[in-house]
Amino acid sequence: YQLHLQCIQILSSTHQAIKCDKAFGKNEIDYTVLPTPREISQSCGMSIRFGLEDIDTIKEIIDQNQIEYKSMYRIFKEDGKKQVEEIN
């Protein structure tokens, strides 16, 4: 992933991470399950990282599978520094 194309979805529980993993796997989405990055949250939550180009498909899968999540963020570099911006 290039940093300016990354999105992170913070999941509400481990159960939701498993549910998300199964749903995304069936839809040939390029994603990674990972601990929530520290620049987003200090909690020990689970997140899904995916490319910005898949965001519409991701939102559709989330709705269809009733996956609960806390928020989504776009991660990009600006002036050589990693930036995090919440997206809807």
Image (spheres, grey):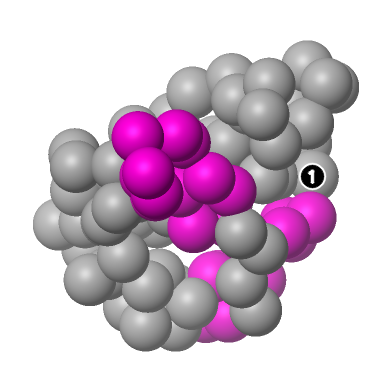
Q: Does residue 57 appear left or right of residue 35 in this picture?
A: left
- Find the residue positioned furthest to the front: 79
Identify residue type, mark 1: Ser
**Residue under circle 1?**
12
Mark 1 Cα-neighbour bin, 10 Å: few <14, some 14–19, many ≥20: some
At x 19% / y 39%, what residue is drawn? 1
Residue 49: in sight, yes or no? Answer: no
Depth check, front residue: 20 or 41: 41
Residue 14 coordinates in the image, percent (x, y): 70, 29
* 78 in relation to 62, above or below: above
* 75 in relation to 52, above or below: above
Residue 62 coordinates in the image, percent (x, y): 54, 70
Instruction: Classify mark 1: helix, strand or loop.
Output: loop
Kindly report the secondary structure that dominates the magenta region of the rendered protein: strand
At x 83% / y 21%, what residue is drawn? 42
Residue 25 covered by magenta stretch: no
The quadrant where residue 73 appears: bottom right
At x 37% / y 82%, what residue is drawn? 56
Q: Which residues are magenta?
A: 62-84
